Image (spheres, rainbow, N blue to C red):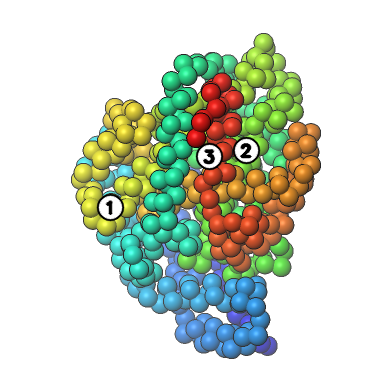
Amino acid sequence: MSAYDELRLELSEVSDVLSALNLLNWDARTQMPSGGVGSRGQQIATLSAIAQDRLASDRLLMLLDECETELEGLPEDSVERRSVTAVRQASAFYRRLSPSLTREFAALKTVAQEHWAQARAANNFALFAPDLERVVAFSRELAQAIGYVDHPYDALVGLYEPGMTAKRLERLFAELRQGLLPLLRRITDSGVTTRDDFLHLDYPVDSQRAFALEVAQAFGYDLTRGRLDASLHPFEISLTRDDVRITTRYNQNFLPQALFGLLHETGHALYEQGVEPALARGALTSDLMNLYAVAGVSFGAHESQSRLWENLIGRSQGFWAHWYERLQLHFPTQLEGVSVGAFHRAVNRVTPSLIRVEADEITYNLHIMLRTELELGLMDGSLLVRDLPEAWNAKMRDYLGITPPSDALGVLQDIHWSSGYIGSFPTYTLGNIMSCQFFEAACEQQPNLEQSLANGDYAPLREWLTQNIYRHGRRFTPDELLRRSTGRSLEVRPYLDYLERKFAALYSLERSSA
Ligand code: ZN
């Protein structure tokens, strides 16, 4: 047996452990009784430690050395060599990271999430602040273990978005802000009020589910390799490409929530279902650094697909021109007398608001910039945890012109920091940016694409995405993936063009002179 075959065998077992971890997490969020929390935490910790030990082992290190010699003749970006590189990076990481540190952090996360929930319920930031201080301190240690040149944030954001740095983010976000803020001002100054009362009527959940699932299947979600459940927060999780699960959350009195939530998760699912079968149970369908079975190349690239299917397709005029009659069949009384144009405007209403997850396509990014800037400050020490609520509110005023009436509706709204995630927020906006760059390239390379989309035929788009993105799993870096499929590195322009085009039409704005 070659060293590489041995490595593959080793990795297939690590990958099985990660899939089992995903399954435990899926179960915890959809089926598990609340009493199971404690024992589930222990099971997850045990399996994580097993994966970590395998990746940090001396035997693996030896195998990696042998593989590197054995594969020297292959191209640097071959599946084999990229697999070895991914495992090498994980091995170095876990050998540097002391097991006691990871155990402490796992324990801290459990406590921090509990305190965060209490702090949010009591609207009392002080209940969560000490834990957050420890999360920040741990994240600094983590950044040390990963290594960085300029900013500790580079190491953290790089865990979720390989190749991204604080400097690059600052540049990208500055350009984005310069486009977004004037556009938002033109929209709010337009005086256009959008009616959306009909979205808040009684929409029976069964019909919501039936319609949304019909669309998901039309997009290409394969139910023989997937399933849909309900959960408190919508998510997608894959065990392998042949078992890719999604969830959504139903609100009987607000139609868009479950529908767009489901289209979003469908985008994530198409990515996972589209990976090449040969890559299954390997290093290129496993996020070894985050101990997570996932084929998507980065959080941002993954998010680009959920946003593409949810927003670029699901909130487009052409989409509703095709699907609206069908929706009306499900909800004849609720949508009686509501034109397709009025419906399309309602599901694209722009309004500065307090909560990130409820934000529209434009203001959403401002919520992300705010969080990213605060995280940068926390990591380099220029912002102290105790000053966070005030800094949060000041930025909300700056970007969105509103002041949160409480910390529960402000700095305490997201679960991320209590879960130990510092550095993941920017990937949501990176996903938005990428989605437009991919979509623009797909339209350029396939002249009939827009016609097929107008006919409700999503196969040509899905095929392009599969060929250019999905099938490769984690073989390429996000930048390589962009350059191979669009000819360019990440750029903000296609995204700003898209927003300008879409919202100038929706709000009858004078076209921007810029
Ligand atoms: Zn997502």
Q: Is residue 73 visible?
A: yes
Marks 1 and 2 close (CB-CB < 8 Å):
no
> Is tag 1's residue or tag 2's residue first in the polypeptide sequence?
2
> Is tag 3's residue or tag 2's residue first in the polypeptide sequence?
2
Q: Residues within 10 Å of mark 3 (few under 14, many from 20)?
A: many
Q: Quadrant of the N terminus?
A: bottom right
Q: Residues within 10 Å of mark 2 (few under 14, many from 20)?
A: some
**Res 434 label:** none
Q: Residue at x 42, y 27 (%)?
A: 185
Location of mark 3 (residue): 496
Kindly report the distance in space between the C-alpha atoms of the residues bearing marks 3 and 1. 29 Å
Q: Residues within 10 Å of mark 1 (few under 14, many from 20)?
A: many
Cβ of mark 1 under 8 Å from ligand 1: the answer is no
| Residue 190 position in % (x across, y down) | 47, 19
| Residue 201 position in % (x across, y down) | 57, 17
In this rendering, the label closer to the viewer, 3 or 1: 3
Q: Which of the 4 image quarters holds residue 508?
A: top right
The reply, left or right, for residue 102 in relation to residue 86 is: left
What amino acid type should be assigned to the residue bearing mark 1? Leu
Location of mark 1 (residue): 378
